[in-house]
Image (cartoon, coloured by chain):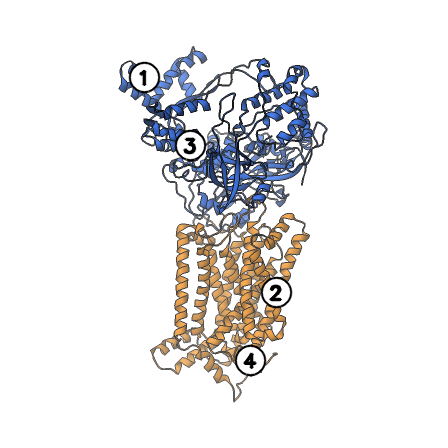
C-alpha cells in the first residue's frame, strides 16, 4: 500500500495505491476491522478503544482506498496462515513515522502475529544515528563559531543532508574541516585537509550486524593510492600528542589493533582455544556468530498515549503533488554514483540508466501536456529544480517521485554533473516522536519548461503483448501443477528433461539453468555481477542511448494488465483503474539452446554447440557478420562496436580468467564457462564428475533470492533437473523449438487471466 | 541461325562508325565527371578506413538491428545485377530481337553491380581483416566454413554468378573486339598500335570465318543456357539469407520468387536509368529508341505487378497464419517508426509503375526515365524496410530498438554509386557499348534497324 509502485511493490500480488502519508490510517483501519469482526480474539478488548474512531468508511476518504477494499484486505490478512505487516520504507517516512510504526505493530498484534511472524529480542543492534535535532545542534554550534575543527569520516553530509538544514553554509564558520573520504565527495571538496582513508577493499575492519554476529573484513588488495587507514591516522596523532595519550595507542597498524580488539570475543566464543587459532579461524570464516534467542513481549500500556493525528503535508494550494524522494536502488543516497557499473545498471523499475527523472502519472502528463523526457520545473517552498519527466503508471496522480543519488558537483568523472537532488526541495521536518528526518513531508508544484532531454531507457517495450515471455499463473493452478509434478518426480525419479539430448551422449554433463520468476524480485544484482565476472565493458550514456549497452544478462520488466483472482475472504476483487496492474521481472540471457538458431547461420563456426551442451562463442574465429544476433529470438547477443577502454584503476577490476574482447566480435552469456572449466578440471584431477552445486555462475551466486539455479541436467537428481520438471516450468518462446537450456518457472500471482 | 550475307546498300558501315566512334578521345565533361566520381570514392574510402580503425560503432547499426544500410546496399546491388543476364541470356533464348542494343550495357552493368555488391559483405564485417575465414581454404586447423550458413551459399552463388556473367559478356564481345581491332589498323600513331595489340589479344584471333561463326553461335547459345538458371538462383540464395532466419518478417517461403522478381524489376529500372543519359552522351539515339523503352517498360510493369502481389501475399500470410508475432511485425512495418520508408516503397514500386499501363507514357522516354528513378529508390527502400523493420521488432518486446544510419554508412552508400558509375564510364569509353554484331544481325533479319521508330517487333 503506497502511492508509488516501488521495486517491492512491483513484486506484490496486489498494489493498493493509497494516498501519500496514509499508511498509519490504513493500519489502524485494518486493525479496526479485525477487532470489529471478532478476528482479534482476546486482544480485542485492549485494542478497541485505540482504534474505535478509525472506521474503514472514515479513512476511505483520507487514504484513497475504498472501505470495502480495506475490509477485504483485513479479512485476508487475518485468514492467511501466516501474515506480517511491515511499516513503509524510508521514502514514506512522514511526520507520523513513529505513530505509523505503532499502528503497524498494533495490526500485527491484532492478527496474532507477535511471537509468530514478528519476534522481538536482543537481535536488533540499535545503531543510533543522529536525529535531526542533533544535527540542528551541531549546525548551530558550527554557525556560532564554536567548532574549531570538524572531522568527517564515512559520510558526505554536504550531499546527503537537506540543504534546508544549512550544513553546507555553516561550514564557512568552521575553523578546520578535515575529510577522511576515499573519494573526492562533496564534503571532501570543501575540506581544508583531506586524509584519504583506504577503501573497504583495502581495509581491515569488523561489523556487528546483529547481536551474536561478529563479522570480520580483510583487505582484498594492497592500497592502490597513497591513503592511510583512519584508525592509523588516530594512532599517529596520539603518538604525536605523546604522554599518556601516546601510551594508549601503541599499535603499529590497524590490523594489530583489530586483533587486540577481538581478544574479548575469544573469551566469549572459544575461551579454551589459543587466540591465534581463534583469530585465524575467524578471519578465514569471515567472523564468528551464535544464535541469540528472542524475548516474549506484551502490549505496552503506554500505547494508549500515542496520538494518531491525521498527517499533513506542507505546501500551498498550487502545490498539488506529494513529493516522494526515494533512495535509488542502484546508487542509494548517492554513494554509488561514482561506480560506472551502477550508473549503467538499469534502474529496476524504470529501466533508465545514467540519469535522474521525476515520475508522474499518465493523467498528470496529459494535463501538463508532457511526454517522457520533457523537462519539468518542480518547486516547493524550499527550492526549485528541473528534471525530465518519466511517465509512470505506477504512481498516483496526486504524487510525484524523484530518485536520490545523482546531482554531484564532484565525486569523480562518472558521477559529476548528472541529475538533481530531491533533498533540495525538502524542509527540515522531523517526526515529532523520534526526531528523525521526515522524508515525506511536502507538496510540490509542477510546471512545463518546454525543454526536452534524452532519457536513456534500455528496455524496448514495457509490455509482452501476450507473447508469454514472462509467464504468470494463478495460485490454485500452481499448487495443482506442482503437486502433479512432484508426484511425477517421485514416481519416475530417473526421467530427465528433453534438453539432455542436446549434448554429446558420451559427456556426463548437459549444463542448464532454472530461473524461478516467483523468487526473482528484479533487483538486477545479477546484471552487475555478470559485468564484474565477465569483463563486460561499461559503454556510457551516449552509447546506451544508441542501444549499445553490453549487458550479457538483462532483467526485463513487463507490465501486465490482469484480472485478479477472487479473494479468499469471499468478496470479489474490484477492477479499479490500476488494480489490475501486475509487474513481472524476467532475467534474460543466452538460453544455450539445444537447437540454437544462431549456430547454423554463422559462416565460420564461431558459434557452435560444445559436447556439454553449451552454446559457445569462439572470439578468435568470429569475423563479425552479426547474423547470429539477428537470428537469436532472445536477442541475447552483444556485439563489440568499439575497443572499450578500462582507464586506471578500472583495469584492475578485470577478471583474469575471462578474455577481454576486441572490437568486431560477437559475445554473449557463457554460463560462466570459466567456472565450469575450473570445476571440471578439479573434478577430473580427483577422478570424479562435477557434483551438483559445485559450479555457480556469477548471476546465481549474487542473486539474493536464489532465483537462479545452475547445474547438470544429465543428473536427474540435481536441483536444476528437478526444477526443470516443475509444474511451473516453461521455456521462453519454446514454440520456436529452440530447446533452451534455461527453464523458467512461472511466477505465481493472483491472476486468472491477462487482459 | 543462318549466316546472312550483307545487303549491298547496307547501313552496316554506319553501325561500325557510330558504335566504335563512341570510343574516341573523351571530352572535358567526361574527365570532370571522372574526377568527381574519384573524389566521392575517396571520401567513401576514408569513411571505410575510419570505420575499420574505430569500430563498427561508427555505423548506426546497433542492438537489435545488427544489419542496416550495408546489407540493404548489398541486396540492392545484387538486384541491379539481375537485368544483365536476364536481358542477355533469357531474352536471347526467347529470340527477343529488341534486346540487341541494350544487352551489352546491361551485361556490363551486371558485372559492375556484382563488383559493387561484393564489397558490402566486406564493409559490413566486424573484423574485415579476417575476411578470408569465409573462404574454404586449406589450413592446418582443418577449419572449413559452415556450409549450413546461407552466407556461405551467398559467397558461392555470387562468385558463380560473377564468373558466368563475366564469361558471357566477354564471349559476346569477341567479334566486336575484332571489329575495333580492325578499325585501329586504319589509324596511325603509337596509341593506336597499343590499342590494336590489346584489342587484338582480347579478340582471341577472331577472323570472322564461317567455322568461327558456327562455333561461336553454338558456344554463345550454351552460355546463355547456363546463365539462365543463375538469374533465378542468385537472388533466391540472397533471399535465403533472410528466409532461412527465424526472424519474423524474414522467415517466409515467398522470399525467393519475390526477391527474383524484385531483382529483375530493379535491374530493368537501372538499365533504363543508365541508358537514357548514356545514349544521349554517346550519340546513340538511333540505336536505343522508344521501341526499346516501350519493351523495357512492359517488363518493368510485369515485375512491378509481381512485386506488388508479393507485398500483398506477405501481409495476407502474416494475417492468415494467426501468429500474433508475425502479424505484429507486419503491422508495425506499415504504421511503426519506419512507416515513411514503407510508404516510399509501396508508392515507388507498386503505384507509380502502374503508369506504364499507358502506351503513351511507355513510349515517352523522359517519363520512363523518371519512373525508373522512382523504382530504383523504391527498391532500395524495399530492402531497407525488410531488413530493418523486421530486426527492430522481433520476438522479445523488451529488446525492441531502432536504427538510424550515420554519416559513415551514408558516405559509403554514396561511394558505392560512384564506384559503380566509374566502372561504367570507363566501359563506355573502352568497349563497344552496343553489340555491333547483333545490331547488324537485326538489320539483316529485318527485325529492327537504327533510327527505326517501329512499334512492334
**Dividing the picture into quarters, in which one does residue B192 lie?**
bottom left
Instruction: Identify the residue at horizontal 67%, vertical 18% (top origin).
Output: A40
**Letter of the chain in orange:** B
Which label lies toward us, 4 or 3?
Answer: 3
Q: Chain of mark 3?
A: A
Ranked by sequence position, the earlier of labels 4 and 2 is: 2
- Mark 4–mark 2 contact, CB under 8 Å? no
Q: Quadrant of the N terminus of chain B?
A: bottom right
**Chain whose colour in the figure is blue:** A
Which residue carries the number 2 mark? B351
Residue that carries the numbered disc 1 in the rendered image: A249
Disc 4: which residue: B442
Secondary element at image label 4: helix
Residue B81 left/right relative to A249: right
Residue closer to the observer: B333 or A428? A428
Q: Residue furthest front?
A: A317
User: Is the C terminus of chain B in the top left, top right, bottom left or bottom right quadrant?
Assistant: bottom right
User: In the rendered image, which residue does mark 3 sit on?
Assistant: A159
Secondary structure beneath dot 2 equals helix
Say which of A727 and A421 sits in front: A421
Instruction: Tell me, yes or no, if residue A677 can be seen here.
Output: no
The answer to whether the residue labelled 4 contacts the one labelled 1, judged by CB atoms less than 8 Å apart, is: no
Q: Quadrant of residue A469?
A: top right
Chain letter for mark 4 = B
Amino acid at each position: 500500500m503506497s502511492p508509488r509502485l516501488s521495486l517491492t511493490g512491483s513484486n506484490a500480488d496486489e498494489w493498493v495505491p493509497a494516498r501519500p502519508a496514509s499508511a498509519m490510517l490504513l493500519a489502524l483501519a485494518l486493525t479496526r476491522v479485525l477487532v470489529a469482526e471478532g478476528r482479534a480474539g482476546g486482544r480485542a478488548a485492549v485494542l478497541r478503544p485505540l482504534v474505535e474512531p478509525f472506521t474503514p468508511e472514515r479513512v476511505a476518504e483520507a487514504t484513497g482506498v475504498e472501505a470495502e477494499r480495506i475490509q477485504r484486505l483485513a479479512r485476508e490478512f487475518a485468514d492467511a496462515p501466516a501474515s506480517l505487516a511491515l511499516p513503509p520504507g524510508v521514502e514514506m517516512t512522514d511526520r507520523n513515522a513513529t505513530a505509523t510504526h505503532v499502528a503497524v505493530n498494533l495490526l500485527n498484534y491484532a492478527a496474532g502475529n507477535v511471537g509468530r511472524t514478528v519476534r522481538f529480542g536482543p537481535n536488533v543492534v540499535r545503531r543510533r544515528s543522529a536525529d535531526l535535532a542533533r544535527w540542528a545542534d551541531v549546525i548551530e554550534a558550527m554557525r556560532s563559531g564554536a567548532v574549531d575543527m570538524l572531522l568527517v569520516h564515512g559520510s558526505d553530509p554536504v550531499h546527503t543532508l537537506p540543504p534546508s538544514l544549512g550544513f553546507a553554509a555553516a561550514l564557512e564558520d568552521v575553523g578546520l574541516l578535515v575529510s577522511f573520504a576515499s573519494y573526492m565527495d562533496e564534503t571532501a571538496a570543501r575540506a581544508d585537509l583531506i586524509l584519504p582513508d583506504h577503501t573497504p577493499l583495502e581495509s581491515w575492519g569488523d561489523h556487528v550486524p546483529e547481536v551474536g554476529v561478529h563479522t570480520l573484513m580483510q583487505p582484498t588488495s594492497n592500497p592502490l593510492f597513497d591513503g592511510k587507514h583512519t584508525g592509523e591516522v588516530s594512532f599517529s596523532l596520539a603518538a604525536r600528542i605523546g604522554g599518556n595519550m601516546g601510551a594508549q595507542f601503541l599499535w603499529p597498524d590497524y590490523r594489530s589493533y583489530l586483533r587486540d580488539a577481538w581478544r574479548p570475543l575469544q573469551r566469549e566464543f572459544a575461551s579454551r582455544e589459543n587466540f591465534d587459532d581463534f583469530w585465524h579461524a575467524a578471519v578465514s570464516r569471515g567472523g564468528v556468530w551464535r544464535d541469540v534467542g528472542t524475548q516474549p513481549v506484551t502490549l505496552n500500556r503506554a500505547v494508549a498515549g500515542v496520538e494518531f493525528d491525521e498527517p499533513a503535508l506542507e505546501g500551498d494550494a498550487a502545490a498539488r503533488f506529494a513529493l516522494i524522494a526515494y533512495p535509488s536502488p542502484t546508487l542509494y543516497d548517492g554513494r554509488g554514483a561514482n561506480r560506472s557499473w551502477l550508473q549503467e545498471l538499469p534502474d529496476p523499475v524504470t529501466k533508465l540508466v545514467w540519469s535522474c527523472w521525476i515520475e508522474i502519472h499518465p493523467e498528470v502528463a496529459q494535463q501538463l501536456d508532457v511526454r517522457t523526457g520533457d523537462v519539468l520545473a518542480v518547486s516547493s517552498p524550499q527550492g526549485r529544480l528541473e528534471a525530465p519527466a518519466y511517465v509512470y503508471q505506477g504512481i498516483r496522480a496526486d504524487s510525484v517521485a524523484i530518485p536520490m543519488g545523482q546531482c554531484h558537483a564532484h565525486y569523480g568523472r562518472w558521477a559529476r554533473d548528472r541529475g538533481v537532488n530531491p533533498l533540495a526541495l525538502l524542509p527540515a521536518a522531523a517526526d515529532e516522536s523520534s526526531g528523525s528526518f521526515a522524508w515525506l513531508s511536502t507538496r510540490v508544484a509542477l510546471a512545463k519548461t518546454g525543454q526536452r532531454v534524452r532519457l536513456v531507457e534500455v528496455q524496448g517495450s514495457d509490455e509482452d503483448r501476450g507473447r508469454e515471455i514472462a509467464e504468470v499463473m494463478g495460485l490454485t493452478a500452481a499448487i495443482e501443477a506442482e503437486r502433479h509434478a512432484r508426484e511425477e518426480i517421485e514416481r519416475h525419479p530417473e526421467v530427465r528433461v528433453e534438453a539432455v539430448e542436446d549434448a554429446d551422449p558420451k559427456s556426463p554433463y548437459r549444463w542448464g539453468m532454472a530461473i524461478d520468476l516467483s523468487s526473482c524480485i528484479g533487483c538486477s544484482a545479477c546484471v552487475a555481477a555478470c559485468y564484474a565476472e565477465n569483463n563486460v565493458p561499461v559503454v556510457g550514456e551516449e552509447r546506451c542511448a544508441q542501444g549499445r549497452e553490453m549487458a550479457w544478462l538483462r532483467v526485463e520488466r513487463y507490465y501486465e494488465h490482469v484480472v485478479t483472482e477472487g479473494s479468499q475472504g469471499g468478496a470479489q476483487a474490484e477492477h479499479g483503474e490500476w488494480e489490475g496492474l501486475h509487474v513481472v521481472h524476467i532475467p534474460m540471457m543466452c538460453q544455450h539452446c539445444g537447437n540454437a538458431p544462431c549456430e547454423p547461420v554463422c559462416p565460420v563456426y564461431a558459434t557452435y554447440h560444445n559436447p556439454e551442451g553449451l552454446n559457445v562463442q569462439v572470439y578468435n574465429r568470429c569475423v563479425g557478420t552479426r547474423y547470429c544476433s539477428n537470428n537469436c529470438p532472445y536477442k541475447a547477443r552483444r556485439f563489440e562496436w568499439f575497443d572499450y577502454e578500462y582507464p586506471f584503476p578500472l583495469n584492475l577490476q578485470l577478471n583474469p580468467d575471462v578474455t577481454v574482447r576486441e572490437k568486431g566480435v560477437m559475445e554473449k552469456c557463457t554460463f560462466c564457462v570459466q567456472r565450469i572449466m575450473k570445476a571440471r578440471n578439479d573434478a577430473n584431477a580427483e577422478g570424479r564428475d562435477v557434483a551438483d552445486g559445485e559450479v555457480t555462475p556469477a548471476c546465481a551466486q549474487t542473486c539474493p533470492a536464489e532465483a537462479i539455479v545452475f547445474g547438470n541436467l544429465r543428473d536427474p537428481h540435481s536441483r536444476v533437473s528437478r526444477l526443470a520438471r516443475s509444474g511451473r516450468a516453461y521455456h521462453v518462446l519454446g514454440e520456436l523449438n529452440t530447446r533452451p537450456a534455461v527453464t523458467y518457472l512461472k511466477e505465481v500471482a493472483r491472476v486468472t487471466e491477462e487482459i | 541461325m543462318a549466316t546472312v550475307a550483307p545487303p549491298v546498300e547496307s547501313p552496316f558501315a554506319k553501325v561500325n562508325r557510330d558504335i566504335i566512334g563512341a570510343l574516341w578521345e573523351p571530352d572535358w565533361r567526361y574527365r570532370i565527371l571522372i574526377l568527381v566520381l574519384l573524389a566521392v570514392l575517396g571520401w567513401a574510402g576514408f569513411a571505410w578506413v575510419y570505420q575499420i580503425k574505430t569500430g563498427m560503432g561508427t555505423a548506426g547499426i546497433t542492438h537489435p538491428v545488427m544489419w542496416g544500410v550495408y546489407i540493404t546496399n548489398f541486396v540492392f546491388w545484387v538486384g541491379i545485377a539481375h537485368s544483365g543476364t536476364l536481358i542477355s541470356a533469357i531474352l536471347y533464348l526467347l529470340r527477343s530481337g529488341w534486346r540487341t542494343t541494350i544487352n551489352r550495357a546491361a551485361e556490363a552493368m551486371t558485372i559492375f553491380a556484382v563488383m559493387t555488391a561484393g564489397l558490402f559483405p566486406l564493409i559490413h564485417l566486424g573484423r574485415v581483416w579476417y575476411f578470408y575465414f569465409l573462404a574454404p581454404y586449406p589450413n592446418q586447423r582443418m577449419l572449413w566454413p559452415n556450409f549450413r550458413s546461407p552466407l556461405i551459399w551467398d559467397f558461392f552463388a555470387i562468385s558463380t554468378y560473377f564468373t558466368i556473367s563475366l564469361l558471357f559478356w566477354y564471349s559476346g564481345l569477341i567479334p566486336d573486339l575484332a571489329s575495333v581491332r580492325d578499325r585501329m589498323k586504319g589509324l596511325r600513331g603509337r596509341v593506336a598500335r597499343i590499342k590494336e595489340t590489346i584489342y587484338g589479344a582480347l579478340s582471341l584471333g577472331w577472323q570472322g570465318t564461317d567455322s568461327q561463326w558456327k562455333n561461336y553461335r553454338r558456344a554463345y547459345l550454351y552460355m546463355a543456357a547456363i546463365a539462365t538458371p543463375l538469374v533465378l538462383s542468385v537472388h533466391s540464395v540472397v533471399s535465403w539469407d533472410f528466409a532461412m532466419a527465424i526472424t519474423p518478417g524474414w522467415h517466409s517461403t515467398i522470399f525467393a520468387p519475390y526477391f527474383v522478381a524484385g531483382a529483375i524489376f530493379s535491374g530493368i529500372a537501372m538499365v533504363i536509368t543508365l541508358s537514357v543519359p548514356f545514349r544521349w552522351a554517346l550519340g546513340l539515339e538511333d540505336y536505343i529508341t522508344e521501341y526499346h523503352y516501350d519493351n523495357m517498360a512492359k517488363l518493368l510493369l510485369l515485375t512491378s505487378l509481381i512485386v506488388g502481389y508479393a507485398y500483398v501475399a506477405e501481409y495476407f500470410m502474416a494475417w492468415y497464419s494467426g501468429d500474433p508475432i508475425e502479424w505484429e511485425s507486419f503491422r508495425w512495418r506499415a504504421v511503426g517508426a519506419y512507416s515513411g520508408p514503407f510508404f516510399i516503397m509501396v508508392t515507388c514500386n507498386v503505384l507509380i509503375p502502374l503508369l506504364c499501363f499507358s502506351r503513351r507514357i511507355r513510349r515517352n522516354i523522359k517519363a520512363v526515365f523518371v519512373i525508373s528513378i522512382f523504382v530504383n529508390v523504391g527498391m532500395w527502400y524495399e530492402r531497407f524496410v525488410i531488413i530493418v523493420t523486421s530486426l527492430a521488432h522481433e520476438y522479445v518486446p523488451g529488446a525492441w530498438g531502432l536504427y538510424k544510419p550515420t554519416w559513415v554508412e551514408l558516405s559509403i552508400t554514396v561511394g558505392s554509386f560512384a564506384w559503380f558509375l566509374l566502372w561504367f564510364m570507363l566501359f563506355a569509353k573502352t568497349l563497344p557499348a552496343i553489340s555491333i554484331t547483333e545490331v547488324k544481325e537485326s538489320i539483316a533479319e529485318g527485325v529492327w534497324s537504327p533510327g527505326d521508330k517501329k512499334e512492334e517487333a
